[in-house]
Amino acid sequence: MELTDSEFQALYGEWQPLSIPSVRDLLPGLTWWVVGGWALELATGVRRHHEDLDIAVPRTCVAALAATWPTTTSGSLTPDR
């Protein structure tokens, strides 16, 4: 089920995307890199608006990445009610 922006904000509140330094601090010791729109901006120097920050990790780091966040029983993100 896809939520509208207002439904998402009603469940989770307003949010701001993490900065690149915040991601670095959140994932110490993990190999990761910036992808998507920020990667294009960093590579070209052409400034643009960003709504989020996309990152990628090598397949060998997926288990370590998963261990840094709480697990779910259903395998999906669900509201905490």
Image (cartoon, rainbow, N blue to C red):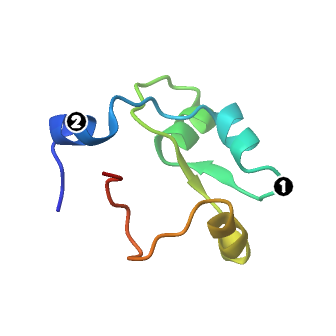
Q: Residue at x 53, y 40 (%)?
A: 40
Q: Residue at x 44, y 38 (%)?
A: 52
Q: Quadrant of residue 68?
A: bottom right
- What mark, if any, has residue 54 been given in the picture? none
Image coords of residue 60 (percent x, y)? 73, 77
Task: Name, please, the residue furthest toward the right.
Answer: 29
Q: Residue at x 54, y 69 (%)?
A: 71
Mark 1 or 2 closer to N-term?
A: 2
Q: Which residue is mark 2?
A: 10
Q: Quadrant of residue 39?
A: top right
Identify the amino acid type marked 2: Ala
- What mark, if any, has residue 29 been given in the picture? 1
Dot 1: element: loop
User: Is residue 27 rendered to the left or right of residue 71?
Assistant: right
Q: What is the C-alpha distance between the residues marked 1 and 2? A: 34 Å
Could you tell me how many numbered marks the image carries? 2
Q: Is residue 1 above or below residue 49?
A: below
Dot 2: element: helix
Inspect this view and state whether residue 16 appears.
Answer: yes
Return the residue nearer the eye: 16 or 50: 16
Q: Is residue 44 above or below residue 31?
A: above
Return the residue nearer the eye: 48 or 55: 55
Q: Nearer the viewer, mark 1 or mark 2?
A: 2
Image coords of residue 76 (percent x, y)? 37, 69
Q: Is residue 73 above or below residue 65?
A: below
User: Is residue 43 rendered to the left or right of residue 49?
Assistant: right
Mark 1 closeness class: few <14, some 14–19, many ≥20 residues within 10 Å: few
